[in-house]
Amino acid sequence: MILKDLNELGLAELEMKLEQCCAATNWYKGLAAKFPFETIEDLKEASNQIWIACSELDYLEAFHGHPKIGNVDSLAKKFQATKGWAGNEQELVEQASMDVIRALSKGNEAYEARFGFIFIVFATGKTAQQMLDLLLERLPNDREQELEIAAAEQHKITTLRIQKILA
């Protein structure tokens, strides 16, 4: 799909496409309302501005649209629309040892219990061990710090997914 094709979608179909990039309703509806765009850079800039204006509830809604890192069952069952993307984003997790997968799963449980949301990381290019290391590094953060970091990671994921739509 090219930008011209995206610009020509009806509102409902456009919102569905954008929701695949980020599950925060205010983000995808806000971005859809700004269409059409002349350039991909204009689209990305609008995405950035809308994301910056989002609230904590928007961030949490976006986080909820992700499978837990290392949870292949969750990936397969819950997120069919983005399964191919999330699968590629997390493909190095699947190559990891079961010990690392179990540690990621256990770390995710501790993280979610501490912060109230799942661990969000821009996983592209990272091994399972690297993601585990990041999770353990971020676990001591306070909730405000972690929400800010997770929101920034979410935005990286969203930007990559926009690029994938237009690839």
Image: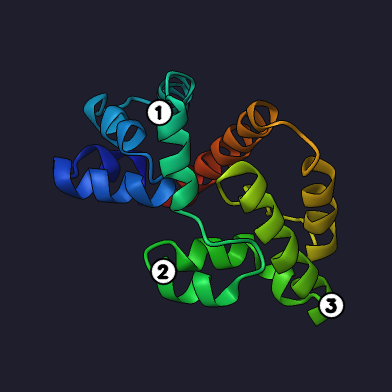
| Earlier-in-chain disc, 3 versus 2 | 2
Distance in Å between CA atoms under marks 1 and 2: 28 Å
From this view, report whether residue 144 is shown above or below residue 163.
Answer: above
Q: Which residue is mark 1?
A: 43
Residue at screen point 26% across, 50% down: 16
Q: Amino acid at mark 2?
A: Lys
- Can you tell which of label 1 and label 2 is closer to the viewer? 2
* Label annotation for residue 78: 2
Residue 153 at x, y = what percent?
63, 39
| Few, some or many residues within 10 Å of mark 3 (<14, 14–19, 20+) | few
* Label annotation for residue 99: 3
Residue 91 at x, y = what percent?
67, 69
Would residue 73 be seen by someone viewing this image from the given angle? yes
| Few, some or many residues within 10 Å of mark 2 (<14, 14–19, 20+) | few
Specify whether 161 is left or right of 124. Answer: left
| Earlier-in-chain disc, 3 versus 1 | 1
Residue at screen point 31% across, 31% down: 26
Name the residue nearer the viewer: 5 or 55.
Answer: 55
